[in-house]
Image (tube, rainbow, N blue to C red):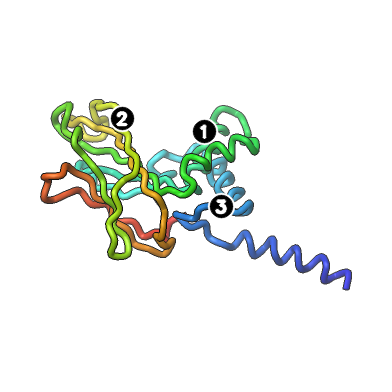
Amino acid sequence: MKGQKIILPALFIIMSFSVPAGAIQIHLSEAQRGEAISYGVRNLNTDTRVFFKEWTVDHGVNGLAILNSEFLTLANSARDAALDGQEMDPYAIEDSLAKTQGKLVFTIYAYGKTEDFAKDYGALLKANGKTYPATYWEDGEVTPSESHPGMLVQELFYYFPVGSISPESQITLQIGTPEQKDKIQFEFDLKKIR
């Protein structure tokens, strides 16, 4: 009887560590939070592109999109804290997660030749036969591109409510101007992303 009391909690802990963190999971479990923080700290000196690879769709000069899942957001915050020689306290963890809870948040790096090339860009998210408009967006600065000489880059942020989108979904983010026929498309398979 005494052995069973020890085995059951231990089994629960082992099982909780094996649960993958879904990209659109609204709340990370304690085990998933620990995994995200560990990923961030463990990859302290990893190249940024390698660190973000799982969450990135890169179309070169046609743009780059990052899906900022709760896992990635917490991992990146832990990485930043570790770079500053600090650990994340419970408040910092909650603050980090609040940015993405209940949302799909995308960071886009769009490339063009003029200062205002992305001024009318908008975004739509397609999942499970439905189309969702962004509920919030921000435009970052337009700066010269380091990775694509002669081009300008603009950082764009798009927020979508998770709603009924399944963590098993394949989703497509489309960005461009309303009159643009061939919008830039970024496809993500959520079941392959933490």
Vertical placement of residue 150 versus 64, above or below = above
Furthest residue toward right: 2
Question: What residue do we see at 57% from left, 33% from top?
Answer: 82
Q: Which residue is mark 3?
A: 28
Look at label 2 and name its amino acid. Answer: Gly
Q: Do the numbered discs 3 and 1 sit on residues whose CB atoms are within 8 Å?
A: no
Which image quadrant for residue 139? top left
- The location of residue 141, given as percent across then percent down, is 28, 26
Residue 80 numbered mark, or none? 1
Earlier-in-chain disc, 2 versus 1: 1
In the picture, measured across the screen, residue 137 lies left or right of residue 148, that is: right
Q: Do the numbered discs 2 and 1 sit on residues whose CB atoms are within 8 Å?
A: no
- The location of residue 118, given as percent across then percent down, is 19, 35
- Look at discs 2 and 1 and give the one toward the viewer: 2
Between 5 and 151, the residue placed more toward the observer is: 5
Question: What residue do we see at 54% from left, 31% from top?
Answer: 83
CA gap, disc 3 and disc 1: 19 Å
| Crowd around label 1: few <14 · some 14–19 · many ≥20 (10 Å) | some
Question: What residue do we see at 49% from left, 55% from top?
Answer: 25
| Crowd around label 2: few <14 · some 14–19 · many ≥20 (10 Å) | some
Which image quadrant for residue 29? bottom right
Look at label 3 and name its amino acid. Answer: Leu
Q: Which residue is mark 2?
A: 140
- The location of residue 39, given as percent across then percent down, is 54, 46
CA gap, disc 2 and disc 3: 28 Å
Question: What residue do we see at 55% from left, 38% from top?
Answer: 78
Residue 137 numbered mark, or none? none
- The location of residue 10, given as percent across then percent down, is 74, 63
Secondary structure under tag 1 reads helix
